[in-house]
Image (spheres, grey):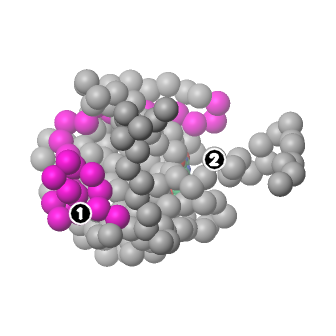
Amino acid sequence: MPKAYSTGVGKFLQHYPKLATVVTVKTKEQENALAIAWHCALSFEPPLYGVAISPKRFSYGLILEAKEFAINFLPIESVKLIAAVGRTSGRELNKFERFQIATEKPIKISAPILKDAYAAYECKLVEHHTYGDHEWFVGEVVATHYLQEAFDEHEVLNLEKIKPAFYIGNDLYAELGKIAVHHIGRTEIF
Ligand SMILES: Cc1cc2nc3c(=O)[nH]c(=O)nc-3n(C[C@H](O)[C@H](O)[C@H](O)COP(=O)(O)O)c2cc1C
């Protein structure tokens, strides 16, 4: 199949799908949630997780103030919640009230954990750095929440039970179709 070439990135969607997550944050005065597709695990020891947040987002200042955040991993059934917090701003409304978002208590930080999340990481901000038009916030994972029945005994997500929400850009969300999980043993590689 022929490939197209470009010297620019256009809408910069070629690297999708990405897991559509929700980052939550709480300061003394305010709590908020926003959708985040740009995020990544960075280190096992200590456990570090990074999220890219534009300074335009209301949440940007809240995370700098709170110095902590939580990242919530959600199933495709929660797609409306993701879109709701990803297309509105906490500057104008309290998203938890407006969208009746059910939360659970965090263990080590203040940011609420979403009830619908099949997993969530509580993170304490350890570093942040500006890369272009986004800020890369690095959090140390100080507590983990997960739906026990969604994971097997090796802590691997059971895709028969949970269909994670993926984002492919342009307000389009995707779920895994026919499930085919391939185990490639390390001795089978060559
Ligand atoms: C699926 C999805 C993924 C998004 N990913 C990001 C992201 O990775 N980084 C970011 O800064 N904004 C991202 N956004 C945009 C913010 O979620 C959006 O601007 C939100 O309204 C900000 O809310 P706030 O102003 O209350 O912080 C995404 C939006 C959607 C719908």
Q: Are the residues flagged by discs 2 and 1 in contact, CB closer than 8 Å?
A: no
Quick check: can you spot residue 104? no
Q: Earlier in the sequence, mark 2 or mark 1?
A: 2
Q: Nearer the viewer, residue 27 or 155?
A: 155
Residue at screen point 34% across, 49% down = 71
User: Which of the 4 quarters of the picture holds residue 9?
Assistant: top right
Look at the image and say whether residue 155 sits in the magenta stretch. yes
Label 1: how many Cα within 10 Å (few below 14, some 14–19, many 20+): some
Q: From what the image shows, is residue 28 above or below residue 81? A: above
Give how far across and how far down residue 171 sits, in percent. Answer: 61, 67
- Assign the N terminus to one quadrant of the image: bottom right
Q: CA distance from mark 2 to mark 1?
A: 27 Å
| Residue displayed at 40% across by 58% down | 181
Is residue 188 shown to the viewer in this render? yes
Residue type at mark 1 is Ala
Residue stretch rendered in magenta on the structure: 132-159
Mark 2 residue crowding within 10 angstroms, few (<14) / some (14–19) / many (20+) = few
Tell whether 113 sits left or right of 41.
Answer: left
Q: Which residue is mark 2?
A: 15
- In the rendered image, residue 21, in percent from the top left (x then y), is placed at 42, 55
Q: Residue at x 47, y 55 (%)?
A: 19
**Callout 2, which amino acid?**
His
Can you give x and y, in whole percent of width and height, for residue 70 in the image? 30, 47
Q: Position of residue 76 (x, y in %)?
A: 42, 70
Q: Is mark 1 within 8 Å of ligand 1?
A: no
**Residue 5, quarter of picture:** top right
What secondary structure is marked by label 1?
A: helix
Name the residue tied to disc 1. Answer: 150
Q: Which mark identifies residue 81?
A: none
Q: Secondary structure at mark 2?
A: loop
